[in-house]
Image (cartoon, rainbow, N blue to C red):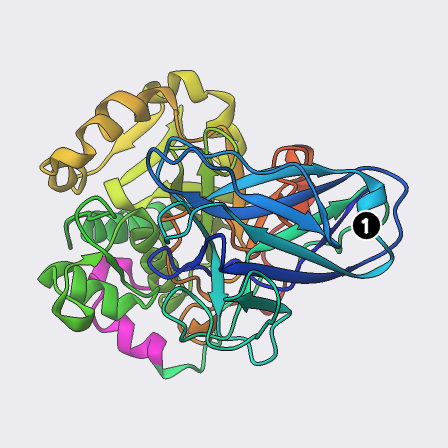
């Protein structure tokens, strides 16, 4: 039994962080229970290429083990073991800085949009603090993405799945765009295949290697921006696996199919080969079925569609069970996806660890969708990981047992 303490949702934007220097210190305040065991501090931070100075950390005024630079230039989780003597019951302060005088060494991940944050910035080496005009451009009120896990206590159970409000006019608006075969009636696999073929052919996958600004998880906007390769502020948008799958989830609900986002990685949250797919519920097969809308792929075993667990069980031989549809050819034209589809995919490289995005109400409540999933290490608290993976994914609050993932949608869901 362990418990995670945090005050944000992990909705960080990688282009907006908090730079720290010898003069510019950042502080996070967390209230924790008493502990007599070592604790783990999780810090989402990015080190610059070639930097040699560590990220220095103090807990309640006493220096702790620093975070060392990392070779990949991305926001990633840094885990620091804390001796129990550093912590105290109630309010605890965690301070971050480095020995560089310019903003050229370390930045902290942040989540904007907080009115009274328990995070603070100092421009005079910690003499005075403010919880406004934060971020490296001094424009946000934000929380730094910093969490602590204690051996005592227990995390809350994972939240129930949330579906679209079927009265939302956005569903009717989206429905008019969908292929006719995806509508109600007919075999569910045929309806799903109609959607995945259409989606995989609708726009070119574009990730952070070629674009900077993330498209929102708004199905009609993704379809428009993706096709035009032009979005907010006239920039090319990031529209990648996340957007194929989130759009699929919304399209399914528009035609009465329950669907949810399925998120994977081959390593810890910092894994290079993460992937975002989807699952849909089939009454006929009495299970959640895995589908990959980005590349128009279903997974079949002797004519039976496969669940996530079934896919994971044959991971190293996934090529035998993958049925690509006509939309796959469109994505194969993209050189950035060649290695993914034809080299890594057949051996299930991305599917070692699984989680679920528990909110499928992406149109009814867009404010709960993250702004940059896939551009940083996984950090959003909307992810529910399998319970047996808690040791690897301890920076997340929700971990579900098999019945959480396998149970059918509740009565009354769309």
Residue 196 place in picture, x, y as percent: 26, 49
Residue 100 place in picture, x, y as percent: 43, 47
Residue 164 place in picture, x, y as percent: 47, 71
- Asked whether, in this view, residue 26 is left or right of residue 140, the answer is right
Residue occupying image coordinates x 69% and y 63%: 29
Residue at the top extreme? 317
Task: Pick the residue in front: 25 or 400.
Answer: 25
> What range of the chain is rendered magenta?
170-187
Q: How many labels were placed on the picture?
A: 1
Residue 397 appears in the figure: no
Residue occupying image coordinates x 73% and y 46%: 149
Residue 48 appears in the figure: yes
Residue 197 place in picture, x, y as percent: 21, 47
Residue bearing mark 1: 87
In the rendered view, tell whether residue 219 sits above or below residue 10. Answer: below
In the rendered view, tell whether residue 412 sits above or below residue 63. Answer: below
Callout 1: 10 Å neighbours few (<14), some, many (20+)? many
Task: Pick the residue in front: 100 or 256.
Answer: 100
Task: Pick the residue in front: 282 or 41.
Answer: 41
- Quadrant of res 127: bottom right
Residue occupying image coordinates x 51% and y 50%: 379
In the rendered view, tell whether residue 235 sits above or below residue 354. Answer: below
Q: Is residue 207 magenta?
A: no
């Amino acid at each position: 039994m362990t418990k995670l303490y945090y005050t944000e949702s992990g909705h960080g934007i990688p282009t907006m962080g908090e730079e720290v220097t010898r003069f510019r210190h950042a502080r996070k305040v967390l209230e924790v229970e008493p502990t007599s065991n070592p604790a783990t501090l999780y810090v989402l931070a990015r080190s610059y290429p070639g930097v040699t100075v560590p990220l220095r950390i103090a807990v309640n005024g006493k220096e702790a083990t620093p975070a060392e630079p990392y070779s990949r230039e991305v926001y990633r989780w840094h885990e620091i073991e804390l001796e129990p003597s550093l912590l105290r019951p109630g309010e605890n302060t965690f301070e971050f800085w480095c020995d560089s005088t310019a903003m050229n060494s370390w930045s902290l991940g942040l989540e904007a949009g907080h009115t009274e944050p328990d995070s603070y910035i100092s421009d005079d080496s910690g003499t005075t603090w403010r919880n406004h005009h934060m971020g490296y451009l001094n424009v946000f009120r934000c929380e730094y993405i910093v969490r602590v896990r204690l051996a005592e206590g227990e995390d809350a159970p994972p939240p129930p799945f949330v579906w679209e409000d079927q009265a939302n006019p956005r569903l009717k608006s989206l429905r008019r765009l969908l292929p006719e075969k995806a509508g109600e009636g007919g075999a569910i696999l045929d309806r799903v295949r109609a959607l995945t073929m259409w989606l995989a052919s609708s726009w070119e996958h574009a990730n952070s290697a070629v674009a900077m600004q993330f498209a929102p998880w708004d199905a009609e906007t993704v379809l428009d921006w993706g096709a035009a390769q032009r979005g907010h502020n006239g920039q090319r948008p990031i529209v990648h696996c996340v957007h194929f799958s989130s759009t699929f989830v919304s399209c399914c609900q528009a035609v009465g199919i329950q669907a949810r986002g399925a998120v994977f990685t081959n390593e810890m949250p910092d894994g290079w080969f993460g992937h975002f797919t989807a699952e849909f519920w089939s009454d006929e097969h009495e299970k959640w079925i895995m589908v990959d809308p980005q590349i128009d792929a279903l997974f079949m075993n002797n004519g039976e569609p496969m669940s996530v667990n079934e896919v994971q069980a044959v991971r190293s031989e996934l090529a035998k069970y993958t049925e690509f549809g006509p939309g796959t050819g469109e994505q194969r034209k993209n050189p950035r996806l060649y290695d993914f589809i034809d080299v890594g995919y057949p051996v299930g490289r991305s599917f070692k660890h699984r989680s679920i995005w528990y909110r499928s109400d992406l149109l009814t409540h867009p404010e709960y969708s993250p702004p940059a999933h896939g551009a940083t290490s996984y950090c959003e608290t909307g992810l529910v990981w399998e319970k047996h993976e808690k040791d690897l994914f301890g920076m997340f609050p929700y971990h579900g047992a098999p019945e959480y993932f396998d149970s059918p949608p509740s009565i009354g869901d769309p």
